[in-house]
Amino acid sequence: MGASLTFSGKKVCFIGAHPDDIELGAGALIAQIVDQTDIRCVTLSDNQKNPELHHLVEEHYASMSALGVPKEKVILGQFETRRFPHFRQEILEYMIQLNKDFKPDIVFVHTRADIHQDHGTVTEEALRAFRGTTVLGFDVIRSSYGFFPNFLIEVTEAEVEKKINALNQYTTYASRYYFNADLTRATLVRYGAIAERPFAEGFDILRVIGKFGCI
């Protein structure tokens, strides 16, 4: 087993289109770093135009709390689900303002392999809004076709369990296959196997800004 690359950021921003996206894509990593760095978890739609999802905001806050993220670091936007491409400019301006206000060192968004129209818009506009910033893409399994992680972050079994617990807060989605605890664990085991570690969360590299130094 080779040595792991160590990376860090004083401010880390996770951006997803809908409640549950961030937890599905990066829940274990959030559980790992939440006490080590300043985090913002930004979801652009609260999905409240769908009457069947009226508990979703409450469940999202509970899910984030299960990962250790306090409510004041969770941001919910008001963009309309499934219509993000129509509001591309407004989403870009929203992210530009987020960049000015928070100034993150690392940004996590949806993978480019994601075919959902809202997810794709988030990623494209994030790459414009956060120029000069490292941007990594996370996998939401039900809409990521052809995703293969080329940036693997080792996580612990305790962090895996926190991710599973966070997803369990979404009682609205309890019957959906991609919230199944066995699937979540299997995915983290698979990415761990690729990394030759017990567990890992997988991302793709959209842009990395760095410098090499010898100590």
Image (spheres, helix red, strand yellow):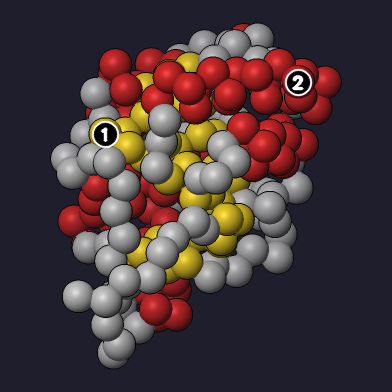
Look at the image and tell me whether residue 57 can be seen: yes
Of the residues under marks 2 and 1, which one precedes in the sequence?
1
Element type at marker 1? strand
How would you rate the neighbour count of disc 1 (Cα within 10 Å): few for under 14, some for 14-19, many for 20 or more? some
Q: Is residue 79 above or below residue 170?
A: above
Q: Amino acid at mark 2?
A: Gln
Residue 210: where, in percent of width, then height?
44, 60
Q: CA distance from mark 2 to mark 1?
A: 27 Å
Q: Quadrant of the N terminus?
A: bottom left
Q: Quadrant of the C terminus?
A: bottom left
Residue 166: where, in percent of width, then height?
32, 38
Q: Which residue is mark 1?
A: 38
**In the figure, is residue 100 to the left or right of 63?**
right
Residue 87: where, in percent of width, then height?
77, 19
Q: Amino acid at mark 1?
A: Asp
> Which residue sits at x=38%, y=70%?
212
Residue in the foreground of this view, choosing between 84 and 190:
84
Element type at marker 2? helix
Q: Which residue is mark 2?
A: 89
Identity of the residue furthest to the bottom in this view: 1
